Each structure stands twice: as structure tokens, then as C-alpha cells.
Amino acid sequence: MPPHPTWNRTLSGRDRDRIARLVTTQPRSSPTWTIDDICRSLTVRVADESRLPARPACPIADIADLMTVMVRGRHAAGDAARVVFVDGRTHRTVGEVRTGRAPHLMDHHPRDPRWAYVRDDMGWVHKIDLYSLQTVRKVRAGLNGASLAVSRDGRFVAAGSYVPHALVIVDAATLEPLKLLPLRSTGADGRPLESDAGMLLATPFADVFVVAHEQARQVWIVDLGPPDFPVTVIDGVGRHLHDGFVSADGRQVVVASYDDDIVAVIDLAEKRLVQRIQAGCQPHVGSGAVVLSRGRMLGIVTNIGSRPCTPHEVTAFDMKSFEVVKRIPVIGPTESPAAHPDAPYIVVDIVGTGPNADKIQFIDEQTLEVVRTITVPGSFGHSHFPEYTARGDFIDVSSRSGGDRCLSRDSGRIAIYDARTLALVREIPLQVPAGVFSHQRSRAVVVGLQPEAGKR
């Protein structure tokens, strides 16, 4: 996510010394956020949900076409922090919901299209009614954190936190907390170790949540059947486990290990690590991209390159044999690949601070060659999070100037491209947009469906 708060100057030497003294002399603290704290934070804004509209009240023909943009605002807080809803067919803005703090990501209920869940930077989970476009409930799952998932049957929502190191499972309907799992383990030196919540996924394969311990080399599989939510621990997965995605059938989980330059494949049926795939320099997989290419299902891995990395490449590997099919050269570090079964291109965003960080590149799904590079207007170095619309007709790209630090500059937009001609068809001005989430793709990822709206 882009840096914040808003401030684009430098500190004096005196102020730098003051901060250094503060950091080196301040006693270490371990903030807590218990299950009782979570209970007390629960806020109900719509007590009687039966009175909500029975169908979408916003001007959209099909809720599957809804695109949602996480809009941070210049200060990552206040009225400018909101989620903005766009019709993916007409490119009209159809509504918004203010979150108070910068929203980070969204997931959708896999069975009932009216519900969505948003996680913000301060750890709140917002239950949003997409038919009336309002928050009906919210709960603070942790003091911060960026992970969120909805179980395949829609009964549970999980949220992982950095502070404290924990995973909480809440009732998806009421947001009442059901289980708090401290992310604690034993390090390689035998000492107790706590870890940030990294990748957090649900899967169409089983009633489980899968969470990565970023610093503990572990992935936990949380069984949602028994009332005590038992955990299976898979150890030795990799150092600094970050993001991941599931296979088309949901049986395999692919998780990126930053410090090992690999992606690890975990089989959820066998509950074990089955493969470690070399994947370039500091792999990052975003929300995941899987494509059918010349009869083979391929997983796509990008490389974020926040440490010096050469060459920059995108790795395509066979999802059955796990063999690397091709390493595709690109012009810079990449973060969030996007693909669609009815579109011809894998889209990757060039990120970082280099001269190409205002560009996106298009890789032909069949030849696995870069066929086009586009400079995104107004980005000035930040063009992130490409996302296909439901039918695969358009690609929405988040474009912003200088992250949250955009005082007196163009604060951003969503740039929308035709998915076949790659022509720019519209720009929607927004104040520091971040992640873009398709309602249909999110449901497809969770329940393993091909997008029905994409069928012609």
C-alpha cells in the first residue's frame, strides 16, 4: 500500500536526532486486543436487516458487474476514505460508502450477492449491503492488519492482524467474534515466536481458512467444522510468507516466500507442502492469476522487487506438474497480475519508484510474450492493481500520484481500458485509489465458478 500520512518534506537534523532518541529509549510495548475488546467494538448500524431492499437500489443492471475501488484519500482517514462502486459495463459511478479509515481490501459472500466485507487500515471489518450501499455492521478485529477471507459456505469471516499477532474468526451475519487464534509458534532456535498474519484464504475445496505466518515459516489450516476450529500446522514452508492464491479447484494453495525467492505449493487434501518453485526475485502473487494456455493450466507469479532484483520477470508454471513453463522478461518489479478466461491477456503492473512505474504490460496468454506496454495517464509512478470486469471486456487500473503523499498534485484516477484493443475508454477521478475488486471475480475465486456473466 502507498505510504502515509501526507507529508512530502524532509526532517531537520535536530528532528532526526529526536526521533532516534525516542525510538531507542521508548520501552517496548505489546498492545493487546482481546476477544472481549472485539465484542465491545461491535457496532450495529442497521438492526433489522429484513427491511433492507430486496434488490439493488443503485443504478446497475446486474450486481455481478459491480467494481469496487478502495479509495484511501490524501490523509488515509476522514470522509475521503471510502469504497467507491462503479458499473463495470457503463463505467458510471453508482455509489460509495465511507469507512473513516483507508480501506485496504474487500471480499464477497460466496452465496448471497448482496453482502461484501471490507477491511480497513485500523483493523475494522465492515459488513456492507451492496443492495442499499451502506455499512450495516462493523467490528474491530485487530489494531491493524490487511487480511480478510469469507468461508466457502458464507458462515464465517476471518481477519488477520499485525498488532496483535492474531487471527479472529467472526460470524459472517452478525460479526460477533467466535474464536481468537494467537499466531504463536516456536522458532528455529526453539524460542517462542509470534508472527504477522500474512496470506489468508478460503477455498472451494474444503471448509477451512488457510493463513500464513509471515515470519514463522508456517502455514496453518483452520478446520471450520468442529466448534473449536482445530489447526493443522505445516512447518518449514518459507521465510517471510506473504500473499497467495488457490488453484482452480481450490485444492492447492500457492504462497509466496519473499526471502527464499520461491513460491510454495501446499496440498489441502494431504495437508502438506508438495513443491517449492523457484520464482525469480522476491515473488509476489497478489490475488492470484491462473490461465488456460495451450491446454495447460498455468499459475502466474510476479516479483515485487523491494530489494535490488535483476532481471525482472514473470514466472508461469504448470499447476499440475509444477514445472516452470516460462520466465517472461518485464521492464520492472511487478505486484498484482490479472487474468480472465474470456480475455486474451495477462496484465501486470510495473511498481516501485523507477522510470517505468507508471506503466502496465500485457502478456499474451497463449504465447506468453509481452505484446504491449502502456503508460497509464496521471500516475506519475504509481499504476497498480489491474482488475478485469465481470465479462472480461475491460480492465480497471488504479492510478495515483505519489501514493498518499499527493499534496497539490493530481491525486489519482481509475483508468479503464478495452481488454482487446487496449484503448483507454474512460478515466474516473478519485482521491488516491488503491485496490480494485470485481464482484464476479471474487465470487469465482471463493467458490470455484467460472464467471457466468462472462459467457456469451
Image: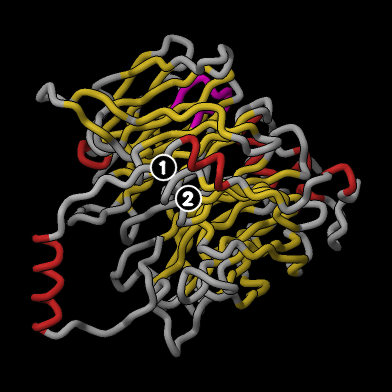
**Foreground: 269 or 210?**
210
Q: Residues within 10 Å of mark 2 (few under 14, many from 20)?
A: many
**Foreground: 229 or 68?**
229
Report the residue at 50% width, 72% height from top.
432
Side (left or right) of 26 relative to 397: left
- Under circle 1, the secondary element is loop
Location of residue 285 with respect to 350 vertically, above or below: above
Please tell me in which quadrant of the rendered image residue 85 appears.
bottom right
Q: Can you give x and y, in whole percent of width and height, for residue 419 in the image?
A: 63, 58
Say whether marks 2 and 1 touch (CB < 8 Å).
Answer: yes
Of the numbered discs in the image, which one, if any, rests on residue 123? 2
Q: Can you give x and y, in whole percent of width and height, for residue 59 in the image?
A: 86, 63
Side (left or right) of 323 relative to 194: right
The figure's colour scheme reads secondary structure
Q: Can you give x and y, in whole percent of width and height, for residue 418 in the image?
A: 65, 63
Give the number of callouts. Answer: 2
Of the numbered discs in the image, which one, if any, rests on residue 211? none
On the rendered image, what quadrant is the N terminus found in? bottom left
Side (left or right) of 152 relative to 6: right
Residue type for callout 2: Gly
Which residues are drawn in magenta? 246-253
Report the residue at 21% width, 31% height from top.
193
**Foreground: 302 or 55?**
55
Q: Can you give x and y, in whole percent of width and height, for residue 359 in the image?
A: 43, 68
Of the numbered discs in the image, which one, if any, rests on residue 33? 1
Please tell me in which quadrant of the rendered image residue 325 appears.
top left
Q: Earlier in the sequence, mark 2 or mark 1?
A: 1
**Foreground: 442 or 6?**
6
Q: Residues within 10 Å of mark 1 (few under 14, many from 20)?
A: some
* Residue 296 visible somewhere in the drawing: no
